[in-house]
Image: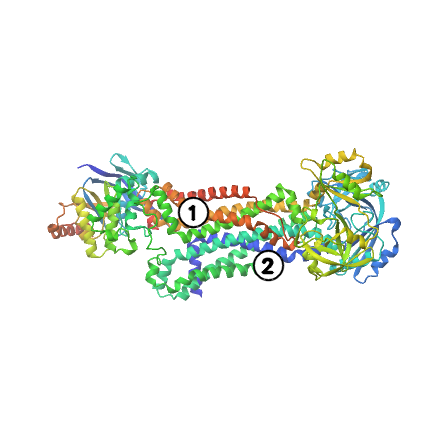
Amino acid sequence: MKTIIKTKKLCKSFSNGGQQIHVIKNLDLEIEEGSFTVIMGRSGSGKSTLLYAVSGMDKPTLGEVWFGSQDIAGLSNDKLAVFRRKNCGFVFQQIHLMDTMSVMDNIIANGLLLTNDKKAIYKRAEKLLARVMIGRELYHKFPGQLSGGEAQRVGIVRALINRPALLFADEPTGALNSSSGFAVLDILSDLHKNGQSVVMVTHDLKSAVRGNRIIYLRDGAAAGELELPPYTKDTENSRIDTLQKFLERMGW
Amino acid sequence: MKKALHIATANIKRHKSASASIIILLMIVSALGTTGLSFMLNLNRDYRSSLDKLNSLHCMFSIPKEKYLPSFETALKNDTRVSQTETSEILFAGPAKISYGGEFTGALLLLNIDTPVSISNPAVIEMDTSVPLRDAVYLPTYAKELGFQNGDSFSFQYQNRQMECTVAGFFESNELSTPNNSILKAAVSNECYRRLSQNIGRHIWLTARCYHSDDAPGVYNDFVSGLDFDFSLQCYGSAGIELSILSDAALSPVLITSATILVFAVLIILISLLVIRFRVTNSIENAIHDIGVLKAAGYTSRQIIACCLAEYGVLSLFASFSGIILTIPLFPLIRNVMVSITGVRWTLGINPIAGAVTVLFIVLFLLLVVVRSCRRIKKLPPVDALRGGIAAYNFRHNFFPLFKGGGTVHIRLGLKNTFIYGKLYMMIGIIIAVIMMTLTVTFAIYESVAVSKTGFITMVGLEIADAELRIAQDTDADRLAEEIKHMPEVRKVIMAETTTLKAEGVSFMGIISDDFSSMETMNTHEGRFPLYDNEIAVPKRAADLLGKEIGDEMEITSNGTALKFIITGYFSVASYGGRIAAVTKEGFTKLNPGYKRGSISLYLNDGTEPEEFKKTLANSPHAEKIDLFTNSKADAETQLGTYTNALYAIIEIIMLISLVIISLTLTMVVRQIVAKRRRELGILKSGGFTAGQLAGQLAVSFLPYTVFGILTGSILGLLVTNPFISLMFSSTGVHNAGIYANPLTTAIIAVFMLLFTFAAAHLSAIRIKHVTVYDLLSE
């Protein structure tokens, strides 16, 4: 399998009240194309920080982040924006839809960054919305008028509109009830099954078992890894057992 | 209360930058308010105290020595209102052409420095002993402002003789140190005095001080009514003046200056208050989550509002007191400017009442804004507050949908925000409109003072022709006027003579003309000028002083004859304390049957310079019929120099302050909006929008409101400039300033403003370039 993202001695520190806090420490990591990588760890272990650092949402303090043949660690903020629009899609825990824009505009705003063909983008948005079970009646609603699950599904469509090479998801079910959460996870599994590379941060077991590779972070370093076979509904319970044992070993 | 104060101070510390910008604006408002009010409240008191400091005269008379009688001083001494009188011998050169910051025609009083006097003694504060005593002249310190230095030549032309002296020092004086009253007081050494006395007549200088300075006009009027002297400035045979006229000359530039400061103070305060309101309202809206936390913890709405009031109460008190402290070092600077433009040794200081009123105004205003902004807190359930308040936008309209219509995604997103944030941006539009109006008014005053001086002369309200001819005795003035009128260089000839008369017993300057309709700068703002021999027009200020109005009769006394005249109209004038009366030639002849016209005022064709025409006239057969040719415009410019200098200095400072405040305000407002939309910008940035694209969208979204603000401000500026300036200058006697905004200048300012706001919006938004998406989303 081809490596899509590779980090070399990745470090990320924050200063807090004059004190440097090293959240990610010399992390070497490879993520393969077509994989569903799940990053787990305790609160404060650096999961989200790692996700934002490798996705070009934040700049690492030290080290390299290779996306294919390009090191994105040293890119300017504007170049990173162009990198993100071409290669990345993001699904956030807080969903982060633009409250002042309709469902369709939220999706199309990102789509029109890569093309001026409004019709084509609209059609693609329609297709993706149908895939995540969002009906036409919601197209012109505002995010405030949607349920949490509906909003997150719109968020996924927005993330996919530019056919990203990698889909990043930061606790995508964190703010949802269990049925909405399952629906979102099913969409992600379905996307992965169709070849979409996904990197997801979560501390939820039922979300984590959707992945085929689990990386456990402890104090900013990869403490362990677990490989799982591709996800199917009927293997869910056995996957949970395997994952639980792995996590126990990791000190979860 | 203690708890509220604790939370308030914690909030101030937390929002240092927001608090700092409010403090800066409030400090400016406080400093301007205190300065403007102190000026208004202290002006008269400080002027009187300056007079006492130098034991300055309240009345003075300069009478030819051969005509002076000791009984004159006795008459003054016997007046119970008079506390001190004094006589001394002086030299009196009048009319003389005096080179004093330009050339003006007036009277020169030369005192002997070696014969000290106790009233208005020219006490020398700077002396150059190297100047030969036979040439030594000492000038008022005001001369230094005109560029005079020790060793410089001081010259004047009297009776066709050029007199030369050398400046040997300067003395402090509160009166007759500027050309404003057409009389200049200087001092010479004993040797120089003797040299000049060979060609200049000796006068007795009779001076008096009153127990109460307000009695000066009464003492003066009573004294001159018992004498057979004409003290009108036109005669120059003798001269007399009293404190109200002197103070008018001294105070007018100060009043005009303070009125100008007030014009801008009002506008800048308006801008600042709008920005502060915008800032406070936004700060409270931004803090709505924290309010939710407090509410959830059990704080009542009343307690939360008390916290907000305490926060802004502390801020406003700190800022307004700091503003007052800021004015302390500023006042000596302003005093120096005042000394330099008036020649008076001012003792200006901060008025505590002005300070208190300013502090009270600022604190009350801010608390009012806070109370208004906090109204919604009362009705807001904690859960809504925790969610960041109730969305203010309208769910029914999806403005500029991105999937249809023309334009790029950036333009459409910009236009979308134009409507979404309409209420917020409208506030910016209003601020820009006021800024634009301020700039239009500023430039209108600047152009009328610096570019076209006649604009200012019009405002002062005097009729200034291009030249004035003083006619030789036994010459038929009307016939000569008719002949000169037909000369090719001459556009128009009018009659506009000045004299002294009394209206209801009060000393007035009279303007006599046979046709007031031909006047070019003197205009009535109510009623009309007199047409018949029993009519008179006066400034509104003078009518108010005498308790009269249009249609009332006014008793005019001249040459011992008193007649009733009907007031037909009010005209606007900012000189002589407004005590000016316009009477027809026939009307004045009724009072003075022997009156003969003594001068001709002429207007020259475009392109003809007065000095060129003077030469033409000197070579014409009319030359022998003319005693004196005066370049009136140049004279007026010299005499009004103190006014224009004052305004010029102030306008330059004000324009600088305006530009600083405009830059500060716009940048602050735009930054506030960027801060408010931070999360939104973060979402867009995460999707791949660059900082430049987002900045462009922001600038586009401002554009309609910027254009609205600029257009509204320009139209308002064009419409209100004259009424606004007239209103602000009304205390100086101006009813119609005649200062209008130039449409071309306004258009240039409008374009500049458009570019400036676009650039400010762009530059403020581009700051997010260096902020990562993570930072934008996580704050």
Would residue A138 appear left or right of B235 to someone viewing this image?
left
- The one nearer the camera, A153 or B327, is A153
Q: Which residue is mark 2?
A: B354
Secondary structure of the residue carrying numbered label 2: helix
Q: Which residue is mark 1?
A: B704
Which residue is pictured at 82% across the width and 61% down the height? B79
Q: Residues within 10 Å of mark 1 (few under 14, many from 20)?
A: some
Q: Residues within 10 Å of mark 2 (few under 14, many from 20)?
A: many
Asked if the residue under mark 1 is in contact with the one under mark 2, i.e. CB atoms within 8 Å, the reply is: no
* Whether residue B629 is situated above or below residue B270 in the rendered picture: above
Instruction: State which quadrant residue B297 falls in.
Output: bottom left
Would residue B306 appear left or right of A23 to someone viewing this image?
right
Instruction: State which quadrant residue B743 falls in.
Output: top right
Mark 2 or mark 1: name the one nearer the start of the chain: 2
Image position, residue A180 (x, y; %): 21, 55
Give me the chain letter of mark 1: B
Secondary structure of the residue carrying numbered label 1: helix
Image position, residue B303 (x, y; %): 41, 65
- The one nearer the camera, B384 or B476, is B476
